Amino acid sequence: MATDLIKSSSQAQSLGNGVPLATGQIPSVVAELLGAISIIDIHTHLFAPSFGKLSLWGIDELLTYHYLEAELFRSSSVTPEHYWSLSKPAQAELIWKTLFVENTPISEATRGVIAVLKAFGLPTDISALGEARAFFQSQTLGSHMQRVMQLAGIDSIIMTNDPLDPEEFPIWLTGVPPHSDFHAVLRLDRILNTWPDHWQAVAAQGYAVDASASGKSVAEIRRFLADWAKRMSPVYMACSLPDTFEFPSDSINGLLLRDAVLPTCREFKLPLSLMIGVRKQVNPRIRLAGDAAGRSNLRALESLCLAFQDNRFLVSVLSRENQHELCVYARKFSNLMPFGCWWFLNNASIVEEITRERIEMLGTSFIPQHSDARVLEQVIYKWANTRRTFSPILAENYRLLSEDGRGVTRADIQRDLDRLFRSNAESWMDLRPRS
Ligand code: FIX
Ligand code: ZN
Protein backbone atom coordinates (compact mmCIF):
# COMPACT_ATOMS: atom_id res chain seq x y z
CA MET A 1 0.00 0.00 0.00
CA ALA A 2 2.60 2.61 1.12
CA THR A 3 4.89 1.57 -1.75
CA ASP A 4 1.98 1.97 -4.22
CA LEU A 5 1.33 5.47 -2.85
CA ILE A 6 5.00 6.41 -3.14
CA LYS A 7 5.15 4.70 -6.56
CA SER A 8 1.98 6.50 -7.76
CA SER A 9 3.11 9.78 -6.23
CA SER A 10 6.55 9.29 -7.82
CA GLN A 11 4.84 8.45 -11.13
CA ALA A 12 2.73 11.57 -10.55
CA GLN A 13 5.94 13.41 -9.75
CA SER A 14 7.53 12.11 -12.94
CA LEU A 15 4.47 13.11 -14.99
CA GLY A 16 4.50 16.42 -13.09
CA ASN A 17 1.03 15.60 -11.86
CA GLY A 18 2.29 15.75 -8.31
CA VAL A 19 4.25 18.96 -8.59
CA PRO A 20 2.52 22.07 -7.21
CA LEU A 21 1.64 24.40 -10.08
CA ALA A 22 2.69 28.00 -10.22
CA THR A 23 -0.45 30.11 -9.69
CA GLY A 24 -0.06 31.44 -13.23
CA GLN A 25 -0.31 27.89 -14.61
CA ILE A 26 -3.51 26.99 -12.78
CA PRO A 27 -6.14 28.56 -15.11
CA SER A 28 -4.80 26.83 -18.24
CA VAL A 29 -4.43 23.47 -16.47
CA VAL A 30 -7.99 23.67 -15.12
CA ALA A 31 -9.29 24.61 -18.57
CA GLU A 32 -7.30 21.78 -20.19
CA LEU A 33 -8.43 19.09 -17.74
CA LEU A 34 -12.04 20.34 -17.67
CA GLY A 35 -12.01 20.37 -21.47
CA ALA A 36 -10.82 16.75 -21.51
CA ILE A 37 -13.07 15.23 -18.85
CA SER A 38 -16.06 13.20 -20.01
CA ILE A 39 -19.13 14.33 -18.08
CA ILE A 40 -22.17 12.40 -16.81
CA ASP A 41 -25.27 14.46 -17.70
CA ILE A 42 -27.52 13.59 -14.76
CA HIS A 43 -30.75 15.24 -15.96
CA THR A 44 -32.00 15.60 -19.53
CA HIS A 45 -35.22 15.17 -21.48
CA LEU A 46 -33.35 13.31 -24.22
CA PHE A 47 -34.29 9.80 -25.36
CA ALA A 48 -32.25 6.92 -26.76
CA PRO A 49 -32.82 6.35 -30.51
CA SER A 50 -35.10 3.37 -29.77
CA PHE A 51 -37.76 5.83 -28.55
CA GLY A 52 -38.25 6.98 -32.15
CA LYS A 53 -39.89 10.37 -32.53
CA LEU A 54 -39.61 11.16 -28.83
CA SER A 55 -35.89 11.62 -29.50
CA LEU A 56 -35.72 15.24 -30.73
CA TRP A 57 -32.80 16.49 -32.84
CA GLY A 58 -31.98 18.78 -35.77
CA ILE A 59 -32.40 22.48 -36.55
CA ASP A 60 -36.22 22.71 -36.47
CA GLU A 61 -36.32 21.16 -33.00
CA LEU A 62 -33.44 23.40 -31.86
CA LEU A 63 -35.30 26.53 -33.03
CA THR A 64 -38.69 25.54 -31.56
CA TYR A 65 -37.20 24.91 -28.10
CA HIS A 66 -39.56 26.39 -25.48
CA TYR A 67 -36.83 28.77 -24.27
CA LEU A 68 -36.84 30.33 -27.79
CA GLU A 69 -40.64 30.26 -28.03
CA ALA A 70 -40.77 32.37 -24.85
CA GLU A 71 -38.36 34.85 -26.48
CA LEU A 72 -40.33 34.81 -29.77
CA PHE A 73 -43.52 36.01 -28.11
CA ARG A 74 -41.58 39.00 -26.70
CA SER A 75 -40.23 40.04 -30.08
CA SER A 76 -43.06 39.22 -32.45
CA SER A 77 -46.70 40.24 -32.75
CA VAL A 78 -47.67 36.63 -33.55
CA THR A 79 -50.29 35.30 -31.17
CA PRO A 80 -49.56 31.98 -29.45
CA GLU A 81 -52.72 30.57 -31.02
CA HIS A 82 -51.49 31.46 -34.53
CA TYR A 83 -48.01 30.13 -33.74
CA TRP A 84 -49.40 26.74 -32.64
CA SER A 85 -51.41 26.53 -35.86
CA LEU A 86 -48.20 26.61 -37.92
CA SER A 87 -46.24 23.51 -38.98
CA LYS A 88 -42.98 22.77 -37.12
CA PRO A 89 -40.82 24.02 -40.07
CA ALA A 90 -42.93 27.19 -40.30
CA GLN A 91 -42.58 27.76 -36.55
CA ALA A 92 -38.81 27.30 -36.88
CA GLU A 93 -38.67 29.76 -39.78
CA LEU A 94 -40.62 32.37 -37.80
CA ILE A 95 -38.28 31.99 -34.81
CA TRP A 96 -35.20 32.16 -37.04
CA LYS A 97 -36.51 35.33 -38.78
CA THR A 98 -37.56 37.03 -35.53
CA LEU A 99 -34.67 36.14 -33.20
CA PHE A 100 -31.74 35.51 -35.58
CA VAL A 101 -32.44 37.87 -38.54
CA GLU A 102 -34.52 40.79 -37.24
CA ASN A 103 -32.68 40.75 -33.88
CA THR A 104 -29.18 39.84 -32.68
CA PRO A 105 -29.11 36.31 -31.19
CA ILE A 106 -27.51 37.58 -27.98
CA SER A 107 -29.56 35.69 -25.36
CA GLU A 108 -28.18 32.46 -23.81
CA ALA A 109 -30.66 30.30 -25.73
CA THR A 110 -30.22 31.98 -29.14
CA ARG A 111 -26.43 32.01 -28.76
CA GLY A 112 -26.75 28.29 -28.12
CA VAL A 113 -28.16 27.63 -31.59
CA ILE A 114 -25.33 29.65 -33.15
CA ALA A 115 -22.78 27.64 -31.15
CA VAL A 116 -24.29 24.37 -32.42
CA LEU A 117 -24.11 25.53 -36.04
CA LYS A 118 -20.47 26.56 -35.52
CA ALA A 119 -19.66 23.19 -33.90
CA PHE A 120 -20.66 21.47 -37.16
CA GLY A 121 -18.79 24.01 -39.27
CA LEU A 122 -22.07 25.39 -40.62
CA PRO A 123 -22.60 29.06 -41.49
CA THR A 124 -24.13 31.14 -38.69
CA ASP A 125 -25.20 34.25 -40.57
CA ILE A 126 -28.81 35.19 -41.35
CA SER A 127 -28.99 32.97 -44.44
CA ALA A 128 -27.85 29.85 -42.56
CA LEU A 129 -31.20 28.07 -42.07
CA GLY A 130 -31.35 26.34 -45.48
CA GLU A 131 -27.85 24.86 -45.30
CA ALA A 132 -28.42 23.81 -41.70
CA ARG A 133 -31.58 21.96 -42.68
CA ALA A 134 -29.79 20.12 -45.49
CA PHE A 135 -26.98 19.17 -43.11
CA PHE A 136 -29.21 17.73 -40.39
CA GLN A 137 -31.40 15.94 -42.92
CA SER A 138 -28.29 14.19 -44.24
CA GLN A 139 -27.37 12.74 -40.80
CA THR A 140 -28.18 9.28 -39.50
CA LEU A 141 -29.17 9.44 -35.83
CA GLY A 142 -26.82 6.74 -34.52
CA SER A 143 -23.54 8.22 -35.78
CA HIS A 144 -24.79 11.79 -35.34
CA MET A 145 -25.56 11.07 -31.70
CA GLN A 146 -22.05 9.71 -31.09
CA ARG A 147 -20.55 12.81 -32.71
CA VAL A 148 -22.74 15.13 -30.65
CA MET A 149 -21.75 13.38 -27.41
CA GLN A 150 -18.10 13.62 -28.39
CA LEU A 151 -18.43 17.34 -29.23
CA ALA A 152 -20.20 17.94 -25.90
CA GLY A 153 -17.67 15.89 -23.93
CA ILE A 154 -20.29 13.69 -22.26
CA ASP A 155 -20.46 9.88 -22.13
CA SER A 156 -23.67 9.27 -20.15
CA ILE A 157 -27.11 10.75 -20.70
CA ILE A 158 -29.75 10.34 -18.00
CA MET A 159 -33.24 10.54 -19.42
CA THR A 160 -36.59 11.56 -17.91
CA ASN A 161 -39.13 8.76 -18.34
CA ASP A 162 -42.79 9.13 -17.47
CA PRO A 163 -44.70 5.83 -16.94
CA LEU A 164 -47.96 7.69 -17.54
CA ASP A 165 -46.96 9.58 -20.70
CA PRO A 166 -49.34 8.21 -23.35
CA GLU A 167 -46.63 8.45 -26.03
CA GLU A 168 -43.89 6.91 -23.92
CA PHE A 169 -45.23 4.10 -21.70
CA PRO A 170 -46.39 1.89 -24.62
CA ILE A 171 -42.76 1.88 -25.85
CA TRP A 172 -41.60 0.51 -22.49
CA LEU A 173 -44.39 -2.09 -22.48
CA THR A 174 -43.19 -3.40 -25.85
CA GLY A 175 -39.62 -3.48 -24.50
CA VAL A 176 -36.77 -0.95 -24.68
CA PRO A 177 -33.38 -2.38 -25.68
CA PRO A 178 -30.56 -1.32 -23.30
CA HIS A 179 -28.34 1.50 -24.60
CA SER A 180 -24.90 1.88 -22.96
CA ASP A 181 -25.03 5.71 -23.10
CA PHE A 182 -28.59 6.24 -21.88
CA HIS A 183 -30.02 5.62 -18.41
CA ALA A 184 -33.65 5.80 -17.33
CA VAL A 185 -35.26 7.82 -14.56
CA LEU A 186 -38.73 7.08 -13.18
CA ARG A 187 -40.46 10.47 -13.29
CA LEU A 188 -43.46 10.83 -10.98
CA ASP A 189 -44.92 14.31 -11.53
CA ARG A 190 -48.32 13.02 -12.73
CA ILE A 191 -48.64 10.78 -9.66
CA LEU A 192 -47.35 13.17 -6.99
CA ASN A 193 -48.56 16.54 -8.35
CA THR A 194 -51.74 15.82 -10.34
CA TRP A 195 -53.12 12.57 -8.95
CA PRO A 196 -56.80 13.63 -9.48
CA ASP A 197 -56.07 13.92 -13.23
CA HIS A 198 -53.98 10.75 -13.51
CA TRP A 199 -55.22 8.03 -11.12
CA GLN A 200 -57.32 6.60 -13.93
CA ALA A 201 -54.20 6.18 -16.07
CA VAL A 202 -52.68 4.12 -13.23
CA ALA A 203 -55.92 2.15 -12.92
CA ALA A 204 -55.89 1.58 -16.69
CA GLN A 205 -52.51 -0.13 -16.28
CA GLY A 206 -54.16 -2.64 -13.95
CA TYR A 207 -53.78 -1.20 -10.46
CA ALA A 208 -56.70 -0.92 -8.01
CA VAL A 209 -56.43 2.76 -7.10
CA ASP A 210 -59.02 5.49 -6.61
CA ALA A 211 -59.29 9.28 -6.85
CA SER A 212 -58.57 9.89 -3.18
CA ALA A 213 -55.77 7.29 -3.01
CA SER A 214 -57.70 5.53 -0.25
CA GLY A 215 -58.06 1.90 0.77
CA LYS A 216 -55.43 -0.25 -0.88
CA SER A 217 -54.43 2.50 -3.34
CA VAL A 218 -51.10 3.12 -1.58
CA ALA A 219 -50.17 -0.56 -1.70
CA GLU A 220 -51.22 -0.64 -5.37
CA ILE A 221 -49.14 2.45 -6.14
CA ARG A 222 -46.17 0.77 -4.48
CA ARG A 223 -46.79 -2.23 -6.74
CA PHE A 224 -47.01 0.13 -9.75
CA LEU A 225 -43.70 1.79 -8.83
CA ALA A 226 -42.01 -1.55 -8.19
CA ASP A 227 -43.17 -2.92 -11.55
CA TRP A 228 -41.88 0.16 -13.36
CA ALA A 229 -38.60 0.08 -11.42
CA LYS A 230 -38.11 -3.51 -12.63
CA ARG A 231 -39.09 -2.55 -16.18
CA MET A 232 -36.96 0.60 -16.48
CA SER A 233 -34.03 -0.11 -14.11
CA PRO A 234 -34.02 3.61 -13.34
CA VAL A 235 -30.92 5.20 -11.79
CA TYR A 236 -33.18 7.34 -9.60
CA MET A 237 -36.82 8.39 -9.19
CA ALA A 238 -37.67 12.04 -9.75
CA CYS A 239 -40.34 14.67 -9.40
CA SER A 240 -40.54 18.41 -9.94
CA LEU A 241 -42.46 20.15 -7.17
CA PRO A 242 -44.23 23.50 -6.98
CA ASP A 243 -42.96 26.47 -4.97
CA THR A 244 -45.84 25.75 -2.59
CA PHE A 245 -44.52 22.26 -1.77
CA GLU A 246 -44.85 21.37 1.89
CA PHE A 247 -43.80 18.29 3.87
CA PRO A 248 -45.14 16.73 5.99
CA SER A 249 -48.60 17.36 4.63
CA ASP A 250 -51.99 15.65 4.67
CA SER A 251 -52.28 16.09 0.92
CA ILE A 252 -52.25 13.12 -1.49
CA ASN A 253 -48.77 14.33 -2.48
CA GLY A 254 -47.60 14.06 1.16
CA LEU A 255 -49.24 10.66 1.63
CA LEU A 256 -47.86 9.11 -1.57
CA LEU A 257 -44.39 10.54 -0.99
CA ARG A 258 -44.24 9.15 2.59
CA ASP A 259 -46.02 5.82 2.11
CA ALA A 260 -45.32 4.83 -1.51
CA VAL A 261 -42.43 6.67 -3.17
CA LEU A 262 -39.88 6.87 -0.33
CA PRO A 263 -40.35 3.24 0.78
CA THR A 264 -39.99 2.06 -2.84
CA CYS A 265 -36.84 4.14 -3.24
CA ARG A 266 -35.42 2.44 -0.16
CA GLU A 267 -36.48 -0.99 -1.42
CA PHE A 268 -34.71 -0.47 -4.77
CA LYS A 269 -31.84 1.58 -3.24
CA LEU A 270 -32.69 4.51 -5.52
CA PRO A 271 -32.17 8.19 -4.72
CA LEU A 272 -35.18 10.48 -5.10
CA SER A 273 -34.55 13.62 -7.16
CA LEU A 274 -36.63 16.60 -6.10
CA MET A 275 -36.67 19.63 -8.37
CA ILE A 276 -38.41 22.24 -6.29
CA GLY A 277 -39.87 25.65 -7.13
CA VAL A 278 -41.74 25.52 -10.43
CA ARG A 279 -44.94 27.49 -10.96
CA LYS A 280 -46.58 25.43 -13.66
CA GLN A 281 -48.41 27.12 -16.50
CA VAL A 282 -48.62 30.67 -15.25
CA ASN A 283 -49.33 31.47 -18.91
CA PRO A 284 -50.89 28.35 -20.46
CA ARG A 285 -51.21 30.02 -23.89
CA ILE A 286 -47.49 29.48 -24.49
CA ARG A 287 -47.50 25.84 -23.32
CA LEU A 288 -44.09 24.51 -22.13
CA ALA A 289 -42.79 28.08 -22.26
CA GLY A 290 -45.56 29.07 -19.82
CA ASP A 291 -43.97 27.72 -16.62
CA ALA A 292 -42.34 30.08 -14.11
CA ALA A 293 -40.31 29.97 -10.89
CA GLY A 294 -41.15 30.76 -7.29
CA ARG A 295 -39.33 30.85 -4.00
CA SER A 296 -40.03 27.73 -1.93
CA ASN A 297 -40.08 27.11 1.78
CA LEU A 298 -37.23 24.61 2.08
CA ARG A 299 -38.36 23.53 5.55
CA ALA A 300 -40.05 20.72 3.59
CA LEU A 301 -36.62 19.53 2.52
CA GLU A 302 -35.34 19.79 6.10
CA SER A 303 -38.23 17.59 7.27
CA LEU A 304 -37.66 15.03 4.51
CA CYS A 305 -33.90 14.73 5.06
CA LEU A 306 -34.37 14.45 8.82
CA ALA A 307 -37.31 12.04 8.81
CA PHE A 308 -35.97 9.76 6.04
CA GLN A 309 -32.26 9.43 6.69
CA ASP A 310 -32.20 6.09 4.82
CA ASN A 311 -33.34 7.88 1.70
CA ARG A 312 -31.01 9.95 -0.46
CA PHE A 313 -32.25 13.18 -2.03
CA LEU A 314 -30.80 14.64 -5.24
CA VAL A 315 -32.06 18.21 -5.11
CA SER A 316 -32.20 21.18 -7.44
CA VAL A 317 -34.13 24.33 -6.59
CA LEU A 318 -35.44 26.75 -9.20
CA SER A 319 -35.44 30.01 -7.28
CA ARG A 320 -32.22 32.01 -7.00
CA GLU A 321 -33.28 32.97 -3.48
CA ASN A 322 -33.30 29.34 -2.32
CA GLN A 323 -29.72 28.49 -3.38
CA HIS A 324 -27.96 29.50 -0.16
CA GLU A 325 -30.45 27.60 2.03
CA LEU A 326 -29.90 24.52 -0.10
CA CYS A 327 -26.14 24.76 0.52
CA VAL A 328 -26.74 25.16 4.25
CA TYR A 329 -29.05 22.12 4.34
CA ALA A 330 -26.48 20.09 2.41
CA ARG A 331 -24.01 20.87 5.21
CA LYS A 332 -26.52 19.42 7.69
CA PHE A 333 -27.62 16.32 5.80
CA SER A 334 -25.23 13.94 4.00
CA ASN A 335 -28.28 12.29 2.41
CA LEU A 336 -28.79 15.51 0.42
CA MET A 337 -26.88 16.11 -2.84
CA PRO A 338 -27.38 19.49 -4.49
CA PHE A 339 -27.18 19.37 -8.25
CA GLY A 340 -27.37 21.66 -11.24
CA CYS A 341 -28.31 25.24 -11.96
CA TRP A 342 -31.81 24.40 -13.15
CA TRP A 343 -33.73 26.02 -16.05
CA PHE A 344 -33.97 29.83 -15.53
CA LEU A 345 -30.79 29.61 -13.42
CA ASN A 346 -28.75 28.13 -16.27
CA ASN A 347 -27.29 31.50 -17.23
CA ALA A 348 -23.59 32.31 -16.74
CA SER A 349 -24.12 35.21 -14.31
CA ILE A 350 -26.25 33.05 -11.99
CA VAL A 351 -24.31 29.80 -12.51
CA GLU A 352 -21.23 31.72 -11.39
CA GLU A 353 -22.90 32.97 -8.21
CA ILE A 354 -24.37 29.56 -7.32
CA THR A 355 -21.16 27.67 -8.08
CA ARG A 356 -18.96 30.03 -6.06
CA GLU A 357 -21.04 29.65 -2.92
CA ARG A 358 -21.30 25.88 -3.39
CA ILE A 359 -17.49 25.51 -3.60
CA GLU A 360 -17.05 27.82 -0.60
CA MET A 361 -19.63 25.88 1.47
CA LEU A 362 -19.44 22.33 0.10
CA GLY A 363 -15.97 21.96 -1.43
CA THR A 364 -16.41 19.36 -4.19
CA SER A 365 -19.33 17.50 -2.55
CA PHE A 366 -22.00 18.60 -5.06
CA ILE A 367 -22.93 18.02 -8.72
CA PRO A 368 -22.37 21.38 -10.47
CA GLN A 369 -24.61 21.09 -13.49
CA HIS A 370 -26.97 19.12 -15.71
CA SER A 371 -27.97 20.14 -19.22
CA ASP A 372 -31.77 19.67 -19.07
CA ALA A 373 -31.43 19.25 -22.86
CA ARG A 374 -34.65 18.52 -24.73
CA VAL A 375 -33.01 18.46 -28.17
CA LEU A 376 -29.91 16.31 -28.73
CA GLU A 377 -27.52 18.97 -30.05
CA GLN A 378 -28.25 21.28 -27.09
CA VAL A 379 -25.73 19.32 -25.00
CA ILE A 380 -22.99 20.83 -27.19
CA TYR A 381 -23.59 24.45 -26.15
CA LYS A 382 -24.94 23.77 -22.67
CA TRP A 383 -21.78 21.88 -21.65
CA ALA A 384 -19.50 24.34 -23.49
CA ASN A 385 -21.15 27.15 -21.50
CA THR A 386 -20.74 25.22 -18.26
CA ARG A 387 -17.05 24.55 -18.93
CA ARG A 388 -16.50 28.20 -19.89
CA THR A 389 -18.19 29.51 -16.72
CA PHE A 390 -16.90 26.85 -14.33
CA SER A 391 -13.21 26.87 -15.27
CA PRO A 392 -12.23 30.35 -13.97
CA ILE A 393 -14.24 29.83 -10.77
CA LEU A 394 -12.37 26.63 -9.94
CA ALA A 395 -9.04 28.21 -10.93
CA GLU A 396 -9.71 31.17 -8.65
CA ASN A 397 -10.37 28.85 -5.70
CA TYR A 398 -7.12 27.02 -6.38
CA ARG A 399 -5.29 30.37 -6.55
CA LEU A 400 -6.70 31.21 -3.12
CA LEU A 401 -5.62 27.78 -1.80
CA SER A 402 -2.07 28.31 -3.10
CA GLU A 403 -2.02 31.81 -1.61
CA ASP A 404 -3.22 30.39 1.69
CA GLY A 405 -0.27 28.03 1.72
CA ARG A 406 -0.98 24.76 -0.09
CA GLY A 407 0.26 24.16 -3.61
CA VAL A 408 -2.18 22.64 -6.12
CA THR A 409 -1.12 19.83 -8.46
CA ARG A 410 -2.53 18.54 -11.73
CA ALA A 411 -3.48 15.38 -9.83
CA ASP A 412 -5.50 17.45 -7.33
CA ILE A 413 -7.37 19.19 -10.12
CA GLN A 414 -8.01 15.94 -12.00
CA ARG A 415 -9.33 14.26 -8.85
CA ASP A 416 -11.66 17.20 -8.05
CA LEU A 417 -13.04 17.38 -11.59
CA ASP A 418 -13.61 13.62 -11.59
CA ARG A 419 -15.56 13.95 -8.37
CA LEU A 420 -17.65 16.97 -9.45
CA PHE A 421 -18.58 15.72 -12.93
CA ARG A 422 -18.44 11.93 -12.44
CA SER A 423 -17.91 10.17 -9.13
CA ASN A 424 -20.44 12.16 -7.07
CA ALA A 425 -23.05 10.91 -9.54
CA GLU A 426 -21.56 7.41 -9.76
CA SER A 427 -21.55 7.05 -5.98
CA TRP A 428 -25.21 8.01 -5.82
CA MET A 429 -26.57 6.03 -8.76
CA ASP A 430 -25.78 2.74 -10.47
CA LEU A 431 -24.67 3.72 -13.97
CA ARG A 432 -23.53 0.27 -15.06
CA PRO A 433 -25.10 -0.60 -18.48
CA ARG A 434 -28.36 -2.63 -18.17
CA SER A 435 -28.17 -6.18 -19.53
O1 FIX B 1 -39.27 19.65 -14.72
C1 FIX B 1 -38.27 19.61 -15.44
O2 FIX B 1 -37.57 18.61 -15.58
C2 FIX B 1 -37.92 20.87 -16.21
O3 FIX B 1 -36.56 20.82 -16.49
C3 FIX B 1 -38.70 20.94 -17.49
O4 FIX B 1 -40.03 20.75 -17.21
C4 FIX B 1 -38.55 22.28 -18.21
O5 FIX B 1 -39.58 22.38 -19.18
C5 FIX B 1 -37.25 22.42 -18.92
O6 FIX B 1 -37.08 22.00 -20.02
C6 FIX B 1 -36.19 23.13 -18.25
O7 FIX B 1 -35.09 23.33 -18.79
ZN1 ZN C 1 -35.85 18.93 -16.73
Image (cartoon, rainbow, N blue to C red):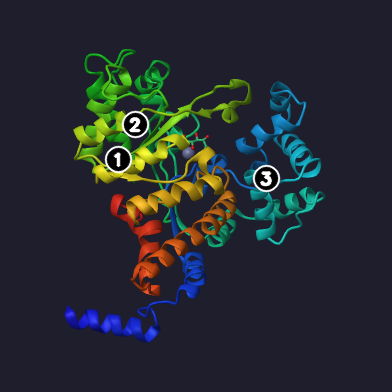
Callouts 2 and 3 close, C-beta under 8 Å: no
Q: Nearer the viewer, mark 3 or mark 1?
A: 1
Query: Of all residues shown, which one is farthest toward the front?
Result: 404
Q: In this view, does 423 lie above or below 76?
A: below
**Amino acid type at image mark 2:** Leu
**Amino acid type at image mark 1:** Tyr
Residue 100 appears in which quarter of the rendering? top right
Residue with the mark numbered 1: 329
Image spot of residue 140 (x, y percent): 62, 55
Image spot of residue 159 (x, y percent): 44, 44
| Residue 431 shows in the view | no
Residue with the mark numbered 2: 298
Label 1 or label 2, whichever comes before in sequence order: 2
Who is closer to the viewer here, 313 or 60? Answer: 313
**Amino acid type at image mark 3:** Thr
Q: Is residue 302 above or below residue 57?
A: above
Residue with the mark numbered 3: 110
> Where does the N terminus fall, quadrant-wise?
bottom left
Q: How many labels does the image show?
A: 3
* Label 2, label 3: how far apart the Cα atoms are: 33 Å
Image spot of residue 405 (x, y percent): 34, 71
Secondary structure of the residue carrying tag 3 is helix
Label 3 or label 1, whichever comes before in sequence order: 3
Image spot of residue 190 (x, y percent): 41, 25
